[in-house]
Amino acid sequence: MTDDQLSLGTAAARNLATTTKSVPQMQEITSRHLLRVLPWVQAIGGVYRVNRRLTYAVGDGRVTFTSTGADVRVIPGELAELPALRGFEDQDALAALSGRFSQREVAQGEAIVEAGRPRDEVVLIAHGKVAKVAQGAYDNESVLGVLADGDYLGEQILLSQDGQDGQWEFTARAVTACTVLTMSAQSFREVADSSESLRAHLDGASNPADRAQNDHGEAAIALAAGHVGEARLPGTFVDYELKPRQYELSVAQTILRVHSRVADLYNEPMNQTEQQLRLTIEALRERQEDELVNNREFGLLHNADLKQRIHTRSGPPTPDDLDELLAKVWKDPAVILAHPRAIAAFARECNARGLYPSNTEYGGQRVPAWRGIPMLPCNKIPITDKGITSIMAMRLGEADQGVIGLNRVGLPDEYQPGLSVRFMGINDQAVISYLVTTYYSAAVLVPDALGILESVEVG
């Protein structure tokens, strides 16, 4: 104390004061909108089976490539993703086909194939973005769709007897600089003529259009309508998939340790064990949402049907792109999920066009919306180093054949619905242990319940 001090200083006074403090804060905690919007269904026994009407596989996968420097080659086994080669396993023949592809660099704006020209080659898109353009009804140019890495064109010629399959109905034009691999019909026939297994496979492969099916590739149900008199009615039955997909519950666990001295002596004014448990559960829930988005087995980004994936027409997410995404989930779309930076990029595109998206009420708060569908932020959707991300739109609930979450409630020592905290004992160092566990998964009941807008630039 100095000689001129007339009263007690604040530093000393604090020793007798009761401080006002917050509970422990944690920057990792987010709104976790995905966990909030998913309708949760109990998976009794830890497994949920999705029974569907029989669907014919038509080979609509994407092809994977390998590169050495600037040289790009298609992986032989990946050619089995083409419709005509679906299920073909002769690696020698696939390697021979892979060697017949030649690499071609395409400049931005250049046509890869042109409408009206004979369709006599298979085109694999190794890198870049390609727009399918056709003449509209009123002499205007219409964009039919956008293709990108792993997509292909002209696969129909593989089932053609004469090596041609009519003419191209559209022009494929490079939106960006592209690397494509092409194989002529003649080269394919040469390999087929020298491979008995490939010839046998092609002879047994039927055109999916020859099968009785509806527009979604499901086995058709024969019906009669508009008839008069005593017309003979068709008989029918609904065929099911013989091997329906089963979703097993995944698990997230950790062991929380608290020293008994801390639990005994430092519980005022806040319970130390309770605060430790609160933050641990928050981290566990964050990991749960991340897994529901990114897990390769059941995560939504990896389990969307390839027909339900589209690419942006230019780069940033535009209103046109969002409209096309909603068209993929046109039967009662419930929610759009995007990274906050993707929502900001969409807002910039709207600002540039003089558009002002409305807000809507969702979960008791005002959120951005497009066409009345709420756009909810989800930071678990990844952004690549190049600033590329995805946007998801989905239909929800079992009643609407949508996307559902799977969990199991009623666990022993349940602390929250679907989350248990079990006492594991005290070791010889007086440390108390608790096992924190939650089980979860997600299921897409029918393919058109989930749509993905890919190649979204947020820079």
Image (tube, grey):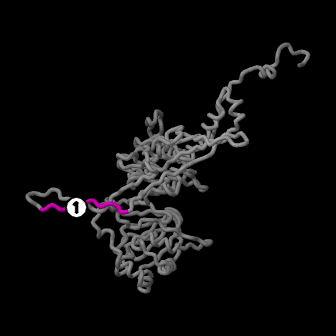
Q: Nearer the viewer, residue 258 or 75?
A: 258
Considering every residue shown, the one lying at the far bottom of the view is 194
- Compared with residue 153, is residue 327 higher up or lower down, i.e. above or below? above
Residue 23 on image: x %, y %: 64, 31
Three-letter amino acid code at the position of disc 1: Thr
Q: Which residues are magenta?
A: 232-242
Residue 17 on image: x %, y %: 74, 20
**Magenta stretch secondary structure, dominant:** loop
Q: Nearer the viewer, residue 203 or 431?
A: 431
- Magenta segment: does it hold 236? yes
**Left or right: 55 as drawn, with respect to 46:** left
**Left or right: 458 as drawn, with respect to 266:** left
Q: Nearer the viewer, residue 136 or 280?
A: 280
Residue 129 on image: x %, y %: 49, 62
Residue 69 on image: x %, y %: 62, 71
Q: Is residue 324 visible?
A: no
- Image quarter (top left, top right, bottom left or bottom right) of the N terminus: top right
- Compared with residue 3, is residue 403 higher up or lower down, i.e. above or below? below
Q: Is residue 212 visible?
A: yes
Q: Circle 1 sits in a helix, a strand or a loop, which is it?
A: loop
For label 1, the residue is: 236
* Residue at 45% over, 42% down: 37
* Residue at 58% over, 41% down: 422
